[in-house]
Image (cartoon, grey):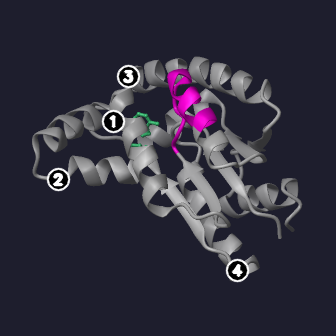
Amino acid sequence: MDQQTLIFLGPQGSGKGTQSKIFEDTLKRIDPLREVVHFEMGKNLRELANKESYTGKLLSEVIYQGELVPFNISSCVFSNHLVEHLTSDCHLIIDGFPRSEEQMPVVDTTMAFYKRVQVTVLYIDIPDEEGVERLLKRARSDDTEKNIRKRLAWTREEWGKILARFDANPIYKVVEINGVQSVEEVHREILSKLGLS
Ligand code: AMP
């Protein structure tokens, strides 16, 4: 199969983390000889936040509040991971970056530098109501419905800008996925839209 470069996008509660992990397993099964590099921004940031350091302490406060960590940290974590792990023929899965429009130039320059000229952007969409319901179920006690709605409204506007930037650049192919289905159904829709089923 061709080398895959995939970016999983979607609002909080869309299930993109779960889907990117299942997709990684499928990719390893279909193409066992090729390495898969899977970058998970949330996981990497949490690891950094758990370190006994001044940066770790400050980061854990930001993550606990549900805010985005500053741009210098997110782009540094992303770039470092690729510097350490990327090889010329590996598949690459990115989960959780970009999450704001200001992160887009980092994605663009990264793809250009690593010569990834065909990038699939999987946007797993769910309506706000579904997102609120899912987030309330897994929310911390201080995470009120009002806060969740405020966050989702902000991210929806930001997703619009991010998707418009992807649409405007021919190296990216945006594929929309209906996130309001069972985990298995979402996975099947991804495989079918990528021509892998
Ligand atoms: P997640 O596991 O994807 O829900 O991410 C956990 C937390 O990490 C988020 O609530 C943010 O605080 C932070 N985070 C994840 N991705 C990004 C990003 N691209 N830019 C800034 N902060 C992020």
Front: mark 2 or 1: 1
Q: Counting residues from the N terminus, which is met first, the one under dot 4 or under dot 3?
A: 4
Q: Amino acid at mark 1?
A: Ile
Front: mark 3 or 1: 1
Q: Amino acid at mark 3?
A: Asn
In whole angstroms, how far apart are the C-alphas of marks 4 and 3?
40 Å
Quadrant of ligand 1: it is top left
Residue range (magenta) = 96-109
Q: Secondary structure at mark 4?
A: helix
Q: Counting residues from the N terminus, which is met first, the one under dot 3 or under dot 1?
A: 1
Q: Secondary structure at mark 2?
A: loop
Residue 12 highlighted magenta (yes or no): no
In whole angstroms, how far apart are the C-alphas of marks 4 and 2?
34 Å
Residue 126 visible (yes or no): yes
Q: Is mark 1 within 8 Å of ligand 1?
A: yes
Where is residue 140, by image quadrant?
Answer: top left
Q: Quadrant of the C terminus?
A: bottom right
**Badge 4: how crowded within 10 Å, few (<14), some, or many (20+)?**
few
In whole angstroms, how far apart are the C-alphas of marks 2 and 1?
14 Å
**Badge 2: how crowded within 10 Å, few (<14), some, or many (20+)?**
few
Vertical arrangement, residue 86 with respect to residue 66, above or below = below
Residue 184, x across and y down, in percent: 70, 64
Residue 107 highlighted magenta (yes or no): yes
**Nearer to us in this view, 192 or 69:** 69
Q: Which residue is mark 2?
A: 51
Residue occupying image coordinates x 63% and y 34%? 108
Instruction: Residue 73: give its label.
Output: 1
